[in-house]
Image (cartoon, rainbow, N blue to C red):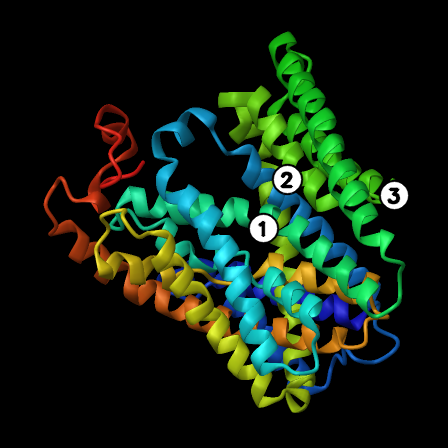
Amino acid sequence: MVALGILAAVFAVYGLVANRTERLGLSRPLLFVAAGVLVAATGAINPLSTGQPASLLLHISEIALALVLFADASRVSARQLRHSVGLPARLLGPGLLLSIGLGTLLALWLIGALDGWECAALAAILAPTDAALGAAVVEDPRVPSRIREALNVEAGLNDGLAVPFLLLFVAGATVSEGINPASFWGLTALHKVGIGAVAGVVVGLIAGELVRRARSAGWSTVASEQLAVLGVIVALFAFTEHLGGSGFIAAFVGGLAAGSRLRNERAAALEFSDEEGALLAAVVFFVVGLFAFKLFDQITWQECLYAVLSLTVVRMLPVAIALLGSGLRARTVLFMGWFGPRGLASIVLALTVFEEDHRLVDVNVIAITTLITVVLSVVAHGVSASILSPRYGAWAAALPADAPERISAASQATSTHGETHPG
């Protein structure tokens, strides 16, 4: 009860100063991580004690990510993507695959405790980016809309795309360590990915259509629709997990399906789910701060170096390769490569592996390395976003009107589809 009271007090203080802290460039995740560190330093809460409900944190984190996945995926407009698919496709396709591959190789080199499958799992956990940590970038009108849109779409979709890879890598790790038979690898691909995708399509289409029809018939209000969508997301996640599928894949695919039915009505129906996801994410970041303080003495230099490389080389080099031929200038490529913050998705995926596959010998190494990377990202990206965003925006504003950075989606749709200025 004391822990709950402290958390409530942190929320109260944040609510009073949120606008001021945002103007200072201090992101919400950064503030809640800092609050967690401060509370842990006082000794008021010990997250490592056996009395702490660790499973409750996992469930809160899972629901938060499910809400984020569903909401982000539902915003994807097929019409808009057709006009501006070039940059997001590069980041989500070769950029994501190269990031997982390079992250795996560096983990094999640096972290000897992990085998190949576990290194790949760690790379998949740290591949997704978090737009909330770079809000000062994606919401800054001074940054060209094409660049903001590409980073936002990437962050909204890459967590859902990384989940199947993680499931397969973890299944391979359990087989290699003799925990499960070799057939488990294939069954995981079939059950987890297949059931999740089917559940997401079916439930998403039905839910989207029902919400649309209820609104047309005057049976629902905006508030009731938001509660309905929230219930659909949580139920979809819970029942898919119960059936042996991946609730995260179901939430991601369900959001895509529901958004296709809701179309222009999606924003109002999903607003509450978005806010609840942000609220739960703040709780998760507060607990991350608690753990970061308590686990500080268990961190090795190899894990720290890997975290730094994950935020720099493992992110920036694949982005540079993926953007070859796009016509974007080097400063833009560096800007997009740097703003690939790691946040909620990485935390939840690591917690899921820790809870469900605790029998893996080196699962603690994966969890601690993820924790270090996320904390470093929260600080580095949270602080640098408000500094680099206006500087880059001012530089981009001085570029010629026909520069690839400044070509809008609407202009792109009417221009040629040559490789010099992809969509």
- Report how far apart the C-alphas of labels 3 and 1 lie in the structure: 21 Å
Q: Of residues 100 and 9, which is closer to you in this image?
A: 100
Q: In this view, does 95 lie above or below 79?
A: below
Q: Earlier in the sequence, mark 3 or mark 1?
A: 1
- Report how far apart the C-alphas of labels 1 and 2 lie in the structure: 9 Å
The numbered dot on residue 252 is: 2
Q: Is residue 24 visible?
A: no
The N terminus - image quarter: bottom right
Q: Earlier in the sequence, mark 3 or mark 2?
A: 3
Q: In this view, does 37 lie above or below 236?
A: below
- Report how far apart the C-alphas of labels 3 and 2 lie in the structure: 17 Å
The numbered dot on residue 242 is: 3
Residue at the (62%, 34%) spot, across then down: 255
Residue at the (23%, 46%) spot, across then down: 405
On the image, the x and y values in percent for residue 119 come to: 65, 70
The image quadrant that residue 330 belongs to is bottom left
Q: Is residue 269 left or right of residue 413?
A: right
For label 2, count other residues whose C-alpha is less than 10 Å away and answer few (under 14), some (14-19) or many (20+): many
Residue at the (23%, 61%) spot, across then down: 331
For label 1, count other residues whose C-alpha is less than 10 Å away and answer few (under 14), some (14-19) or many (20+): many
The C terminus - image quarter: top left
Mark 1: which amino acid?
Answer: Asp
> Please, what secondary structure does the residue beneath circle 1 have?
helix
Q: Is residue 382 above or below residue 74?
A: below
The image quadrant that residue 222 belongs to is top right
Mark 3: which amino acid?
Answer: His
Q: Of residues 19 and 232, which is closer to you in this image?
A: 232
Q: Earlier in the sequence, mark 1 or mark 2?
A: 1
In the orientation shown, which residue stands out farthest toward the bottom? 297
From the image, tell me which residue sits under label 1: 159
